Structure formats: C-alpha cells, structure tokens
Image (cartoon, helix red, strand yellow):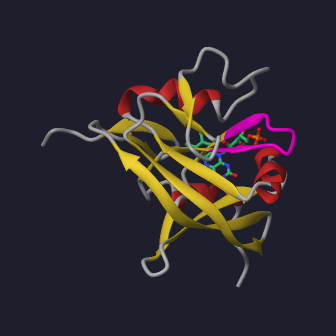
Amino acid sequence: MPDVDPSQFRQLLGRYATGVAVVTANAPEGTPAGMTANSLTSVSLIPPLISICVDQSADMHRVLLQSEQFVLNLLATDQEMISRRFAGQHESRFEGIGYHLNHQGLVVLDGIIGHIECERYDTHDAGDHTIFIGKVTGGATAVGRPLLYYRGGYTELSDK
Ligand SMILES: Cc1cc2nc3c(=O)[nH]c(=O)nc-3n(C[C@H](O)[C@H](O)[C@H](O)COP(=O)(O)O)c2cc1C
C-alpha cells in the first residue's frame, strides 16, 4: 500500500487533541535550550517512562542527544505566546520569559500547570524523528488549565 501524503497525515493526526509542552535541556556549554513539543506520551508506569519524538533536523535534537536530563514544561491556556516562541525563529527564545533553574540546573518556566523531570533512558530512530524515552525522576503540578492543540491550532477546555 502507498504511504499517505504529508497533508493527509497532518489532517489525520490533527484530529487527535493534545496538550502542549516545552522541552528544556542544557547544551554541553551549559546554555539553556527549549522547543515546543506535543508528541509527549506516557509509556510505562514501572519504571515510569515517557516519550517525545523530535525531528532530527531540529537544533533541540542535538541538545537532547548530548544532555542526560530534560524537563517537560506543561503549558497553561494563557501561554500560547510561549508555545509560538519556542516553535519559531527568535534570536533568544528565553528573552523576556520568566523561569527558574531546578535542582538539575534545568529551566522550569513560570506559569505552567506542571513540569516533568526526566533522565534520558533510551532513544530510537523512527523515520525523520528520534523517539527520546525519558525516565521520570520528579516534577510538580500547579493549579491551572491546559493549553490544547487541535487541527493545527490552539484551543482550550470548555467549561461544559
Ligand atoms: C504545537 C506544536 C507542537 C510541536 N511538536 C513537536 C514535536 O513533538 N516534535 C518536534 O520535533 N517538533 C515539534 N514542533 C515543531 C518545533 O517546535 C519547531 O520545529 C521548532 O522550531 C524546532 O526548534 P529547534 O530547531 O530550535 O530545536 C511543534 C510545534 C508546535 C507549534
């Protein structure tokens, strides 16, 4: 059977609503890096594993291959601008963005509804992406509502 074309692939997967995360890690020279990702998936409970898929052409791909640890920052409804910032072209993605460094020395953004701290556990090549599997070592949740991504756009939970 032939493959679906990229536009049909996007259309099909676009019907699967997700949250939005910013994955943060430090480059070898210690500089923080971050990238918007919605491919976060729960993988295993024991041990506690998650996965994210990262485009092999992304700068973040190189950073994640070289960093033992990373953080998933789970964005709140009012953080669409942060999602756009970490998915787009900007000289300095962290400029004007509030954050602190956690006990691993990694960026945790302000105003998020939770963050998940991970150690790199495994990687698998998958087409033009790499599946990064992280072992969850910590994290925290906060009060708030999630930013959602659906059919190529941002949305939020309705109160119904
Ligand atoms: C809502 C949303 C979700 C995204 N999810 C992913 C993802 O899971 N994996 C990925 O590789 N890129 C994803 N992207 C695209 C990257 O954020 C984008 O290509 C970014 O510019 C890559 O940055 P970098 O090359 O500086 O690392 C997503 C973009 C948006 C807007």
Residue farthest bottom in this picture: 1
Nearest the viewer among 81 and 116 is 116
Residue farthest top in this picture: 96
Q: Quadrant of residue 29?
A: top right
Question: Does residue 58 belong to the magenta stretch?
Answer: no
Residue depicted at x 28% and y 36%: 144
Query: Which stretch did the figure color magenta?
Result: 24-34
Q: Which quadrant is the C terminus positioned in?
A: top left
Q: Picture coordinates of residue 158 (x, y %)?
A: 21, 39
Quarter of image, ligand 1: top right
Count of numbered circles in the view = 0
Residue depicted at x 58% and y 59%: 118
Question: Does residue 25 belong to the magenta stretch?
Answer: yes
Q: Picture coordinates of residue 130 (x, y %)?
A: 75, 65
Relative horizontal placement of residue 57, taking residue 117 as reference (left or right): right
Nearest the viewer among 146 and 14 is 146
Q: Which quadrant is the N terminus positioned in?
A: bottom right
Q: Is residue 33 something that shows in the picture?
A: yes
Q: Picture coordinates of residue 61 (x, y %)?
A: 79, 53
Q: Picture coordinates of residue 84 (x, y %)?
A: 59, 29
Relative horizontal placement of residue 40, taking residue 155 as reference (left or right): right
Residue depicted at x 35% and y 41%: 146
Q: Quadrant of residue 157?
A: top left
